[in-house]
């Protein structure tokens, strides 16, 4: 079988260098760092010495798990620190940026690590200014901004409002979420699910026969976890309801662990009322034993109980959520061994879903694999995906789900 790793090379994780200057808004840089990390970006921080008076380097070191750069000579192992920082960055964003630092960069002054790095960087430079309204509107500041814009520096406009000094006007640091969105756009990373709540189910459910035996379906949970991770990376507020799997929850995702179908339904119903998009990727067991034994059944003494297990239907989670969806967008999965598209389309209608992800399953097909081949089935369209990584399939599912949601 072809090596899926060779076929689907992992893309390099983008690195953003966040510059923090001496401004009261420096604490908001923590939110910017977290927002970028949630989108799957590696973040490094460089600070001016004045910035450390507002937020300590330890805070950023704890958030990024990376060394925090402050002084030109604070890393003995790297004698040319400003060059290595500049070379690592795919984007350098200074947020907040004071009038003083803006003036230095505009006029080629490099007298500390941050400004030296800014002069050395060849990657895109973005500036989110923050200062008093009169400083912001001063002719010198506007001239410096004009110089920088002519050189290709992208500005993330300051907002108007009540300023820390008591004045009212333009000069407030842009909202951290807007800064994150602008940086991600510069990196070419979608952040189009910001403001939306996404509910994802993943993994199998297990239905106990007794304390040591159970009924279940095949599922590694990889597909559902990939969807949850991708949705969080694109800015969504994600709740992941997961059956038992051997996977670590994605960063930035609220994970609810369950075992049975009834547990999963209860968790989904609690999250459902505040949800915009639902992706039901879990392999929910259709049936469960009518009665689960309180103690282990023994072959020698409980042969009859083991030979005949009375089954009852489990709740249909996809159909239950689909019937109550209103303006929500509901995505389901159809794991089929034959007539994949026909069975998937039948499920689309029967479960009140907006989109069904249909795939053929079996030995070395889908279950437990890192790749998937699927057909996205909607009421008026079918999109056949080639074999690709489950991460890429997750992105395509979310693309379609968002497009359907925006039509409602």
Image (cartoon, helix red, strand yellow):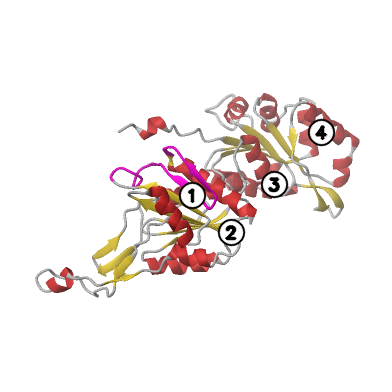
Q: Kindly identify which residue carries mark 3.
A: 178
Instruction: State whether residue 256 appears in this view.
Output: yes
Q: Residues within 10 Å of mark 1 (few under 14, many from 20)?
A: many
Q: Residue at x 58, y 26 (%)?
A: 84
Image-based side of 379 in relation to 47, left or right: left
How far apart in space, not on screen, are marks 4 and 2 (Cα)? 40 Å
- Front of the two marks 1 and 3: 1
Q: Kindly identify which residue carries mark 1.
A: 377
Numbered label attached to residue 145: 4
- Front of the two marks 1 and 4: 1
Q: Secondary structure at mark 4?
A: helix
Q: Residues within 10 Å of mark 4 (few under 14, many from 20)?
A: many
First reached walking from the N terminus: tag 2 or tag 1: 2
Q: Kindly identify which residue carries mark 2.
A: 276
First reached walking from the N terminus: tag 1 or tag 3: 3
How far apart in space, not on screen, are marks 2 and 3 (Cα)? 21 Å
| Residue 138 drawn at (x, y percent) | 89, 39
| Residue 177 drawn at (x, y percent) | 67, 49
First reached walking from the N terminus: tag 1 or tag 4: 4
Do the residues under discs 3 and 4 have CB atoms within 8 angstroms?
no
Instruction: State whether residue 201 appears in this view.
Output: no
In this orientation, which residue lies closer to the viewer: 7 or 123? 7
How far apart in space, not on screen, are marks 3 and 4 (Cα)? 20 Å
- Front of the two marks 4 and 2: 2
């Amino acid at each position: 079988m072809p090596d899926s790793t060779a076929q689907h090379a992992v893309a390099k994780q983008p690195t953003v260098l966040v510059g923090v200057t001496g401004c009261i808004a420096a604490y908001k840089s923590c939110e910017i760092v977290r927002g970028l990390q949630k989108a799957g970006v590696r973040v490094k921080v460089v600070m001016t010495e004045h910035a450390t008076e507002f937020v300590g380097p330890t805070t950023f070191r704890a958030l990024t798990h990376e060394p925090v750069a402050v002084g030109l000579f604070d890393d003995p192992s790297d004698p040319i620190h400003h060059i290595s920082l500049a070379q690592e960055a795919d984007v350098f964003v200074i947020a907040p940026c004071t009038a003083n630092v803006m003036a230095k960069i505009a006029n080629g002054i490099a007298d500390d690590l941050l400004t030296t790095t800014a002069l050395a960087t060849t990657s895109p430079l973005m500036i989110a200014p923050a200062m008093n309204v009169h400083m912001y509107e001063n002719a010198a500041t506007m001239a410096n901004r004009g110089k920088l814009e002519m050189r290709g520096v992208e500005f993330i406009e300051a907002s108007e409002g009540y300023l820390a000094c008591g004045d009212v006007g333009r000069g407030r640091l842009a909202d951290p979420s807007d800064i994150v969105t602008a940086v991600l756009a510069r990196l070419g990373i979608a952040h189009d699910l910001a403001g939306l709540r996404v509910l994802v189910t993943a993994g199998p459910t297990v239905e106990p026969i007794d304390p040591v035996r159970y009924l279940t379906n095949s599922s590694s949970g990889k597909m559902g976890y990939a969807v949850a991770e991708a949705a969080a990376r694109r800015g969504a507020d994600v709740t992941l309801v997961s059956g038992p799997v051997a996977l670590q929850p994605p960063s930035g995702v609220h994970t609810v662990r369950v075992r049975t179908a009834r547990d999963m339904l209860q968790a989904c119903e609690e999250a459902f009322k505040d949800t915009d998009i639902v992706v039901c990727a879990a392999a929910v067991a259709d049936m469960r034993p009518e009665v689960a034994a309180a103690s282990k059944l023994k072959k020698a003494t409980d042969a009859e109980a083991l030979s005949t297990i009375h089954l009852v239907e489990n709740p249909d989670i996809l159909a239950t959520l689909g019937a109550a969806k209103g303006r929500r967008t509901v995505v389901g999965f159809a794991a089929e061994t034959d007539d994949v598209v026909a069975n998937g389309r039948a499920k689309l209608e029967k479960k009140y879903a907006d989109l069904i992800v249909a795939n053929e399953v079996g030995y070395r097909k889908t279950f437990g694999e890192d790749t998937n081949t699927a057909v996205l089935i909607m009421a008026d369209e079918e999109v056949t995906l080639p074999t690709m990584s489950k991460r890429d399939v997750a992105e395509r599912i979310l693309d379609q789900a968002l497009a359907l949601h925006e039509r409602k």
